[in-house]
Image (cartoon, grey):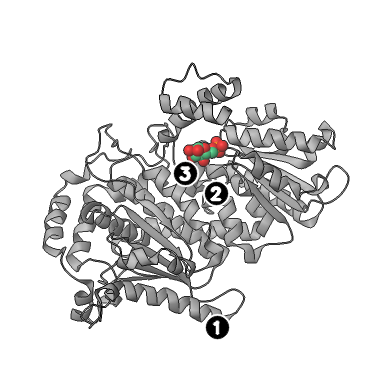
């Protein structure tokens, strides 16, 4: 079945939610907690090594009931089945959406199994030092050249799982900023460096420009034949890879049914395999697969991604909040926000519904944030005392990796204290000056994970993938295309010609003309 095409605002549940919102908008969470001592235990999902406390939200039992009704009415369950069964749910690109198949150990597609095996062998050769560069030296540095989904996922995972890394130095070049490229190359020895050019389409301007620059830099001291020992590629466009000069031995496929922002589980994760070893990469896939099973098989009331998605809809569409923050209390996760910004905002930043009609309600949330406790010393003032309502996901780990318990206790204390401070504020307390009043009543979810491992990271990432999927279904939008990035790419071509030829006659806009004259002067 293709996806249902139901405008959520026409459902019975939406109408009931609208009325329910009017009736409950002035409730204070502080009172909800004091009136019900067992509130927390009713709003917790305790699953494997995840403990998700969503009790600190502006919801009652009825709110949840109505949100679940909404999910039923828009046929969320059927939509989940359509995705996992490989229906062509990315209708505007006529593609299936099967990143979950990349981590399905029970029904592994032959092409996935074959590619994983190739990744395993390749990464083992590199890690063991058996893969030699053109002067006979082992590889000690990997550089991933890619952008967007071909960069953010691997970069984030390599950073998040730094504790599990081996001796290899792994770098990422994404921006077409030549200064960054040259700064990165500055410290590298071409004899011991391997470049992985990652691009699903293999047409992306930034990636091809960077790859060409780096190839020329490499060829300053090496011959064409040496390329085979220092350049590999990951792409679904293997013809273009060949034209670039990388032969099929050195290329790893990916497929149309894997969206760029969901591709770290594919050969796009080759730099991850090199950095943490294939067995750890498999554990990452395994964790994601466990979350996939949880998502498919668990009733909505206990289903982590579904509950998180519905809460987000409640704030976005009824309270009118525009953003949500993510605050992981682990410095390892400092690239998580940037990664999820692509996932969430590229997927759900849409204003045309699945019937092709303009939308008259809010869709995609703005995702932002940073790691705690740093964030507390940066933007928390606004969250506590500003005029905007910002729901937050707090993410923390019960155990540290290096066993520095004194630090971990402080980290956890800060995380948990913030959730309570946001909830309670100075409600019903004497405060000497209005400047020190905290209203409280600020919503948050707290996700406590036992320990940061490849498995738990896999679960966490899959959790957010499924959350954004549910939101897209509820908003009646197509989450798996990204037409919104095309116009800028097209205009950049004309603008580049104007800069290169120092000729602005083909530019109509007076501001753009002025800017071009300035940069060319
Ligand atoms: O992997 P590539 O084909 O080079 O694409 C890289 C990126 O390009 C565009 O920005 C798309 O919007 C992203 O979704 C994609 O991840």
Depth check, front residue: 386 or 273: 386
* Residue labelled 1 has its Cβ within 8 Å of some atom of ligand 1: no
Find the residue positioned furthest to the right.
135
Residue 31: % across, % down: 19, 76
Residue at (15% x, 66% y) in the render: 26
Q: Are marks 1 and 2 in contact (CB under 8 Å)?
A: no
Name the residue: 63% across, 63% down.
162
Q: Mark on residue 330?
A: none
Helix, strand or loop for disc 2: helix
Q: Quadrant of the C terminus?
A: top right
Q: Is 194 situated left or right of 240 in this image? A: right
Q: Residues within 10 Å of mark 1 (few under 14, many from 20)?
A: few
Asked whether mark 2 and ligand 1 are closer than 8 Å, the reply comes as yes
**Label 3 sits on residue:** 98
Please state the horizontal and vertical placement of residue 331, each as a whole percent of the image: 54, 66
Q: Earlier in the sequence, mark 1 or mark 2?
A: 2
Q: Determine whether the residue tagged by mark 3 lies in a helix, strand or loop.
A: loop
Quarter-wise, where is residue 291 in the image?
bottom left
Which label sits on residue 152? 2
Q: Taking the image as drawn, is residue 289 in sight?
A: no
Q: Position of residue 13 (x, y in %)?
A: 16, 52
């Amino acid at each position: 079945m293709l996806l249902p095409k139901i405008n959520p605002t026409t459902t019975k549940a939406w109408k009931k939610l609208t009325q329910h919102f009017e009736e409950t908008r002035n409730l204070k969470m502080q009172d909800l907690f004091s009136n019900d001592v067992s509130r927390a235990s009713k709003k917790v999902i305790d699953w494997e090594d995840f403990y998700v406390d969503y009790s600190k939200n502006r919801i009652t039992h009825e709110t949840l009931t109505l949100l679940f009704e909404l999910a039923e009415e828009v046929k969320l369950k059927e939509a989940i089945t359509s995705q996992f069964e490989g229906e062509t749910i990315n209708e505007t690109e006529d593609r299936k959406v099967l990143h979950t198949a990349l981590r399905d150990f029970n029904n592994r597609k032959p092409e996935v199994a074959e590619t994983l095996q190739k990744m395993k062998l390749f990464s083992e050769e590199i890690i063991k030092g058996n893969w030699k560069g053109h002067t006979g030296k082992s590889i000690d540095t990997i550089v991933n050249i890619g952008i967007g989904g071909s960069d953010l996922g691997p970069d984030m995972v390599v950073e998040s799982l730094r504790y599990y890394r081996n001796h290899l130095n792994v770098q990422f070049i994404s921006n077409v900023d030549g200064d960054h490229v040259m700064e990165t190359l500055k410290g590298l020895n071409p004899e011991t460096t391997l470049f992985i050019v990652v691009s699903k389409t293999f047409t992306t301007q930034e990636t091809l420009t960077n790859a060409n620059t780096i190839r020329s830099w490499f060829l300053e001291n090496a011959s064409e034949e040496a390329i085979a020992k220092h350049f590999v590629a990951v792409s679904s466009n293997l013809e273009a890879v060949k034209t670039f000069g990388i032969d099929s031995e050195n290329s790893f496929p990916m497929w149309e049914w894997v969206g760029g922002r969901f591709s770290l589980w594919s050969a796009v994760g080759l730099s991850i395999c090199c950095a943490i070893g294939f067995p750890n990469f498999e554990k990452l896939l395994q964790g994601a697969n466990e979350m996939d099973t949880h998502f498919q098989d668990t009733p909505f009331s206990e289903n982590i991604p579904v509950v998180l998605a519905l809460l987000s809809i409640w704030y976005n569409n009824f309270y009118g909040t525009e953003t949500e923050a993510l605050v992981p209390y682990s410095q390892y996760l400092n690239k998580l926000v940037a990664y999820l910004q692509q996932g969430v905002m590229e997927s759900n930043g849409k204003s045309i519904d699945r019937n092709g009609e303009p939308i008259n309600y809010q869709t995609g949330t703005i995702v932002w944030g940073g790691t705690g406790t740093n964030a507390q010393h940066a933007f928390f003032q606004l969250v506590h005392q500003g005029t905007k309502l910002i729901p937050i996901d707090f993410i923390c780990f019960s155990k540290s990796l290096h066993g520095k318990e004194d630090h971990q206790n402080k980290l956890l204390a800060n995380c948990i204290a913030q959730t309570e401070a946001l909830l309670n504020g100075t409600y019903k307390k004497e405060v000497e000056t209005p400047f020190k009043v905290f209203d409280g009543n600020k919503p948050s979810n707290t996700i406590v994970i036992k320990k940061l491992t490849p498995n738990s990271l896999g679960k966490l990432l899959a959790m957010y993938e499924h959350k954004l999927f549910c939101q897209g279904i509820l908003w009646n939008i197509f989450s798996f295309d990204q037409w919104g990035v095309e116009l800028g790419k097209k205009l950049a071509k004309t603008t580049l010609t104007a800069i290169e030829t120092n000729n602005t006659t083909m530019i109509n806009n007076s501001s753009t003309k002025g800017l071009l004259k300035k940069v060319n002067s």
